[in-house]
Image (cartoon, grey):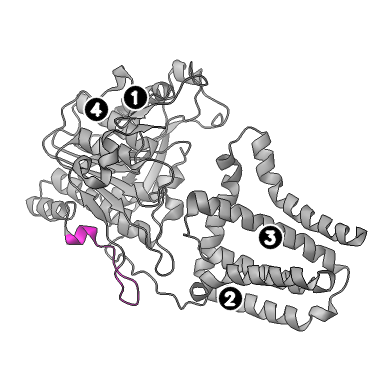
Amino acid sequence: MVRSLKKWHFFVLGIFLVYIEPIFYLLAGDDIGGALWPHAYRTLILTSWLREYKQMVFVILLLSTALSYLFMKKQKRWKIPISITLIGSLSGLITIFYLLDFAYFRGAFLLLPTVYGFLLLILILNSIPEFKINLNMIGVIFAIWLISPGLSAITGLAPSPSPADEVSMGEFEVRTSVHPYPMPDEVESVRGEIEADIEFSIYLTQPENYDKEMPLAIIIHGFANPGFSTYEDWAGHLASRGMMVAFLQYPSDVQPPGWDTYSLVEQDGMSNHPFHIPRAMALEAALNYLPSLLDSKVNTDHLYIGGHSLGAGYALLMMDKTIEMGWGNSSLFIDLEQPYARPVHDHLQLNSTIPDNFIAHIALSEDDMSVNDCFGVEHQKTLGDGALLMRIPSDRYGFPRMVASHYLPAAETHDTLADWGFYRRIDNQAEWIMAQTNSDAQSIEDSYLKLIDSDDFRDMGQWSDGTPVNKITTWDEAMTSPEFEHCQSWVGP
């Protein structure tokens, strides 16, 4: 009994070693999402690597499993505690993976559980002398359950999605410069500790050796993600076609009066977060500083504003401010990706008249677990004519699985689905703004046809066995659609 209990001590130790990191972050004040974020990020990096080298990994795992089986009766006793500890650690990693899969991954990462299954099988074979046969069988069955869904993928036999061949960087190389802007004292005084080391700046990305007029693009990041690297691909696709792109950082971690006592209300595409006020002040400060960074080649009559998540709500706010400044009066494109709320506060309402030459894309993701679809529906209603609402579909038919999550525009998740569902649109949006800037009537018409609802717009390619990938769904007036009838009276949370 004592000997058996001691063996399980090693198993519990293994689990504890995996959970040390999230426990530390929880004790430091992070929520469960923040505590597990390092695991999520490492999962993303590891999965990307596994996709590239999947067949080599499969051969190594298969040979290791076979060798473990052949030599399982010759295990050294000193190795058994190590194997049991590793089984505990692997069990901890598996539980964290499935927690993250339920909340975020949504079945997109197929290979990692398969690898975990093989490793579990190898470790069981290395500790068989110390486990009872019934425990071994349970472990082996569980390992096979982990391996089975991804077996066709790791062997390279699953159908693969077709690349979006028309998606690519433009003809110009790009460069990025960083420009800190003056933060208002009212914002500086309520900044939290999480972003204390960030010098909030405007990141300007522009084409190299480009002497013509450049339209201006503004990109607004999502909540708690001010890093330019996450949106570098978005900025690069625009700038490489001849645009000046300004990425505006703003503080997410702010603690204004009432931040810890208010009751959240979400309605009509807006929310009453007190955090909106200092964030909006920071963005307005950045916007007011931006003209001093622009040279004479930048033509602000032609304007693109894009935002992701919370940044999409603030993109509407920036649209209002820039129209008041006289920008975007010749052509205006608004792109809202997985949009969250705009502010409900009276002084942050939209008062400007949208110019006639206007197009907007509002993109929802089928497996978005972060924001409610009704925000996008309300934003379409606010923008009116010229605003197209769409839902980017998920398709788990082949491998890599195409799962449309909240993070579709992030450079870290730039894959085939992102090319079809996001970057293809970004390229066409840039072509339309560039054609407007250059007064190229034929290019204006050609690019416009790629931005409005059509069979080609909704197409997402096909799997390598000829099966069509699920298509984009679109709505011209989503609020009147039965699909979104619940949004007419929706109030959250």
Q: Nearer the viewer, residue 359 or 72?
A: 72
Residue 240 shows up from this direction: no
The first of marks 4 and 2 along the sequence is 2
User: In the image as oriented, which residue stretches furthest toward the bottom?
Assistant: 70
Amino acid at the residue labelled 2: Phe
Residue 2: image quadrant is bottom right
The first of marks 3 and 2 along the sequence is 2
Q: Is residue 8 above or below residue 229?
A: below
**Residue of label 3:** 90
Label 3 residue SS: helix
User: In the image as oriented, which residue stretches furthest toward the right?
Assistant: 2
Total labels: the figure holds 4
Question: Closer to the observer: label 3 or label 2?
Answer: 3
Q: Are marks 4 and 2 in contact (CB under 8 Å)?
A: no
Question: Closer to the observer: label 4 or label 2?
Answer: 2
Q: Residue at x 12, y 54 (%)?
A: 443
The first of marks 1 and 2 along the sequence is 2
Q: Are marks 1 and 2 in contact (CB under 8 Å)?
A: no
Amino acid at the residue labelled 4: Asp
**Residue of label 4:** 320
Amino acid at the residue labelled 3: Leu
The first of marks 1 and 3 along the sequence is 3
Please give the label number shown on residue 284: 1
Label 1 packing within 10 angstroms: few (<14), some (14-19), many (20+): many
Kindly report the distance in space between the C-alpha atoms of the residues bearing marks 4 and 2. 54 Å
Question: Closer to the observer: label 3 or label 4?
Answer: 3
The first of marks 4 and 1 along the sequence is 1
Question: Closer to the observer: label 1 or label 2?
Answer: 2
